[in-house]
Amino acid sequence: MFNAANVALSWYQLTGNFMLLLPLGFIAPFLFPKWRGLLRIVPRIFLTTLTIEIIQGTSTLFYLSNRIFDMNDLAVNTAGGVVGYVIYLITIFVMKKDKNFVPNHVEKGNLNEHNLYIKS
């Protein structure tokens, strides 16, 4: 029988999995210039997701949790990371259009906690 509560739970879980690695796709290119480029970041996002899923699967084998390895989570997490990277690309495009918005060290990839600021 159809149970609306399970449908709501599945949408909640799907949204959570999508949002899990979205920040990685957005923030990592700022912090790690070598990750810039779709063909560079997608494998790293996928491997991060795979690591999370392997840990979930193996923890169940040792009775440490009731989580399972799920291929759907692998795909949705990776898609979320890719969308985060697309948001990064849009952000960089907007920042480069306004020359007062981006300091030189951000364009060169020399970004750390001491020089992360926006020019005014």
Image: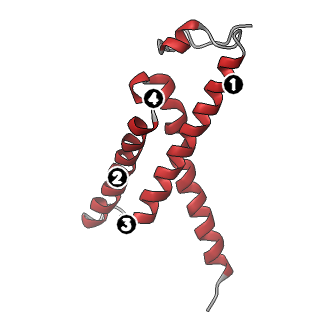
Query: Closer to the observer: label 2 or label 4?
Result: 4
Q: What residue is shown at x 38% (from left), y 48% (from top)?
A: 46
| Figure coloring | secondary structure
Please state the horizontal and vertical placement of residue 96, each as a whole percent of the image: 65, 18
Q: Which mark is residue 113?
A: none
Query: Closer to the observer: label 1 or label 2?
Result: 1
Q: What residue is shown at x 61% (from left), y 8% (from top)?
A: 103
Question: How packed is label 3: few (under 14 Cα within 10 Å), some, or many (20 or more)?
Answer: some
Query: Closer to the observer: label 3 or label 1?
Result: 1
Query: Disc 3 and disc 2: Cα gap in Å?
Result: 12 Å
Tell how many labels: 4
Closer to the chain start, of discs 1 and 4, is: 4
Quick one: 110 or 64, which is closer to the camera? 110
Which residue in the protein does label 3 denote? 68
Please state the horizontal and vertical placement of residue 97, each as a whole percent of the image: 70, 18
Q: Which mark is residue 50?
A: 2
